[in-house]
Every structure is written in C-alpha cells, then in structure tokens.
Image: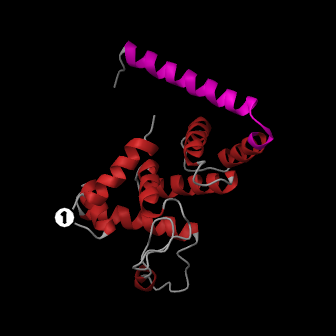
Amino acid sequence: MLLSPKNVYCALLLFCLLASSVSVALTTNTELDADLRQILIKAINETDSFSDRFEAEVWLMDMSQRLKRRIKDPKKRLNLLKLVHYEAQRVDLPPELILAVIDIESNFDRWALSYVGARGYMQVMPFWLKEMNRPNDDLFTPETNVRMGCTILRFYVDKEKGDLTRGLARYNGSLGKTKYPNKVFLALRKRWYRI
C-alpha cells in the first residue's frame, strides 16, 4: 500500500514530535526520570514481543506515561506493559485493547476482587483454575492473570467469529448487551489508542 505524500509527511512529523518529546522527557527531568530511563532501557532490551527495538521504545514510553498516574512505580508499570504486550501478541489481540480491558475490569489494581469473586487485573473467575486442573495457581499473580485473561478473551472473540463487541460481552458475562464492550471501546479511544 502506497502512502500519499501528505500521509508520509504526517507520519514523519509525528515521528519527529515523538522523538523530540521522548528526548526532552529523558534529558530534562529529575533523577527519578534517570532511573526510569535505565529501567526502560533494560525493559526494551529484554522484550521479545516487539518487531524491533524502536517500536518497543516508542510503545513502552508512550504507554508508561499514560499509566503513570495509576501505577506509580516505574518498574511495576513497565513489567505490566511488557507482560500485556507479550500476552496480547501471543493471542493476536492488540495490546491497547488488553490495556482497555484491564482499565475497565480492575482500574489496574492487581489485587482487585469483585463481589462475584473475579480476581486480579483482568478479573478472571477462579472456576477457570479448576477447569484447567490448576487449583494451586494464583489469579493475583500478574503473569497467570493476564495470560488467562488474554486467552479467554481470544477464545470468546473466535467463538463469536471475530465480532469483538460480542466477544467482549461474552468475556464480561453480558452476551447480547453492549454496555460493557462500549465501556472498553471508550477507554480504548480515550486513553489507550495507538498513535
């Protein structure tokens, strides 16, 4: 697909703006940002779900800034972002969608517990552990929670023949209704969109 000169110009302009804002952010802030830079460099170098290092740097920096007010600790924030990216790519879902689901499900509270017993970031129900014959797994462990949540969502989207609205509703236990999927789509558009 060929891009028009206008689209190429816009893409280059966006790239320059992002590069300069990342550069300014990394060079003009306090000592805490120096620590974040080191953590970010380590995270980028350890990431295997990105197609290249530049993509990892841009995505992790962008999403880390968006998540900053919800998860204060930069290490925890980057670990969660790497995990979400990896698990989303593993099941062929956009990582931004998974961030929107976590946003709505738990507001990024690792220890979230719903009144019906759903647990963790993606609010996975404990009965899944019994179904998988893994009763000793802990749904508050981010790796377990995000892997199971992403896998379940992918299964439901496939079950609904690629219909993301119906797949999200099924994930939430509200098949046939659009309130939950619309909340996820709104969070995706407002907070987790991809530039």
Q: Is residue 162 visible?
A: no
Which residue extends farthest right?
31
Q: Is residue 160 visible?
A: yes
Q: Secondary structure at mark 1?
A: loop
Q: Position of residue 18 (x, y in %)?
A: 57, 28
Number of residue marks: 1
Which residue extends farthest left?
176
Q: Position of residue 82 (x, y in %)?
A: 58, 53
Check disc 1 and give the amino acid type.
Gly
Residue at point 45% right, 48% down? 96
- The image quadrant that residue 9 belongs to is top left
The quadrant in which the N terminus is found is top left
- The image quadrant that residue 101 belongs to is bottom left
Image height of 9 relative to 121, above or below: above
Residue at which label 1 appears: 176
Residue at point 65% right, 53% down? 72
Asked if the stretch drawn in magenta spans residue 17, the answer is yes
Colouring chosen for the image of the structure: secondary structure
Q: Position of residue 172 (x, y in %)?
A: 33, 67
Image height of 186 relative to 5, above or below: below
In the rendered view, does 116 fall on the left or right side of 87?
left
Q: Please name the predominant secondary structure of the magenta segment in the image.
A: helix
Which residue range is magenta in the image? 5-33
Q: Which residue is more in the foreground, 194 or 85?
A: 194
In the rendered view, does 52 fall on the left or right side of 152?
right
Q: Residues within 10 Å of mark 1 (few under 14, many from 20)?
A: few
In the rendered view, does 27 fall on the left or right side of 68?
right
Q: Position of residue 186 (x, y in %)?
A: 35, 47
Residue at point 39% right, 19% down? 7
Asked if the stretch drawn in magenta spans residue 158, the answer is no
